[in-house]
Image (spheres, helix red, strand yellow):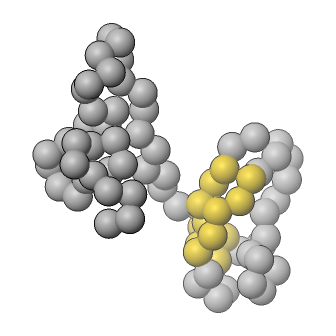
Amino acid sequence: MPIYGYQCKKCSETFETLVRSGEQPTCPSCNSAELEQQLSLIASPAKGGDSDAPACSNAGAGPACAACPGASMFG
């Protein structure tokens, strides 16, 4: 059961929700089903067993993700 990010087309609320197979999520603010799925920025695990390697390909190329060296979860 994956977690997806959505933005409501009716009230512009942005939220994440767990989506089971065959379910249609609705906005928690206005209950609308008119949603736009947002892109997810999930980092993949490092390949080759190198635990010191960053888990994302964005390392050093812009804003750091949680897996990039020197990154902070809180900005």
Q: Quadrant of residue 58?
A: top left
Q: Is residue 8 above or below residue 23?
A: below
Instruction: Please state the horizontal and vertical placement of residue 29, each as a whole percent of the image.
Output: 74, 84
Residue 58 in view, yes or no: no
In the image, taking residue 15 as reference, residue 48 lies left or right, namely left
Residue under the image location 81 percent in, 80 percent down? 31
Q: How many marks?
A: 0
Between 44 and 74, the residue placed more toward the observer is 74
In the image, taking residue 42 as reference, residue 9 lies left or right, namely right
- The quadrant of the picture occupied by the C terminus is bottom left
- The quadrant of the picture occupied by the N terminus is top right
In the image, taking residue 61 as reference, residue 39 lies left or right, namely right
Residue under the image location 76 percent in, 51 percent down? 19
Q: Quadrant of residue 53?
A: top left
Q: Is residue 74 above or below residue 59?
A: below
Between 70 and 64, the residue placed more toward the observer is 70
Between 67 and 33, the residue placed more toward the observer is 67
Residue under the image location 64 percent in, 77 percent down? 8
Residue under the image location 79 percent in, 70 percent down? 26
Q: Is residue 34 above or below residue 54?
A: below
Instruction: Please state the horizontal and vertical placement of residue 55, each as a whole percent of the image.
Output: 34, 33
Residue 33 in view, yes or no: yes
Which residue occupies the extreme right position in the image? 22
